[in-house]
Image: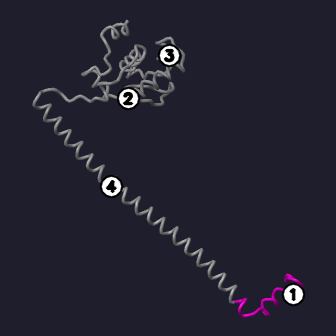
Amino acid sequence: MKCWGGIIVKEAILNANISDTERLKQSFTMAFASIKDELDEHRESINDNTNELHANYEYMARIDDKLRKISERIEQIEAITARITGMPITDNEQTSIRLTETEKKIFLLLYTEAEKQATYETIACYLGEELPIVKEYITTMIEKGVPIRKRFCSGGTCLDIEPEFKEKQAKENILRISQTTVMKFLQ
């Protein structure tokens, strides 16, 4: 036990006035009540924020649903317009791909080498470029929207073009590859 001014604390508590004990009890009660009030305020604030988040989520879900319906209606209008005019609907994302001449050569190589499984090394050999430069070209083409698939095969990483894109390129010439470029590639 500790001494407090020469008197043992236990004895001080036992010998204390009822009024001192009562004051101490009131102090603790007030402190705990204050802590409880603060915690209740925090809880209410958290509940309010949770309710606001839930309301925002529901609002966003309604907006998504309306956007989906608008998109469906636009597709219906495009289909009707295509039937009336006889003009096919073009995908604007696919028509905006612009490649450099070197990227076009790489595309043609991948386009024609599907069965032979083109690799970074074969492309580098064909172009006469270093391997890191070829990898950068491939990355840039993918970023531009050319769907180049990468697979692991016995010779390393094999590259090819997605079949749907190849078909679309053959029909619509999305990449605007001229006959001159094709002739240079074939030589």
Residue 158 picture quarter: top left
Residue 9 picture quarter: bottom right
> Which of 9 and 64 lies nearest the eye of the viewer?
9
Which is closer to the viewer, label 4 or label 3? 4
Which is closer to the viewer, label 4 or label 2? 4
Q: Is residue 4 magenta?
A: yes
* First of labels 4, 3 by sequence position: 4
* First of labels 4, 1 by sequence position: 1
Q: Is residue 158 magenta?
A: no
- Determine the secondary structure under disc 3: helix
Please give the residue where the numbered disc 4 appears in the rendered image: 59
Gap in angstroms between the C-alphas marked 4 and 3: 52 Å
Gap in angstroms between the C-alphas marked 4 and 2: 35 Å
- Determine the secondary structure under disc 4: helix
* Residue 147: image tag: 2
Describe residue 84's horizontal placement relative to residue 78 as left or right: left
Q: Residues within 10 Å of mark 4 (few under 14, many from 20)?
A: few
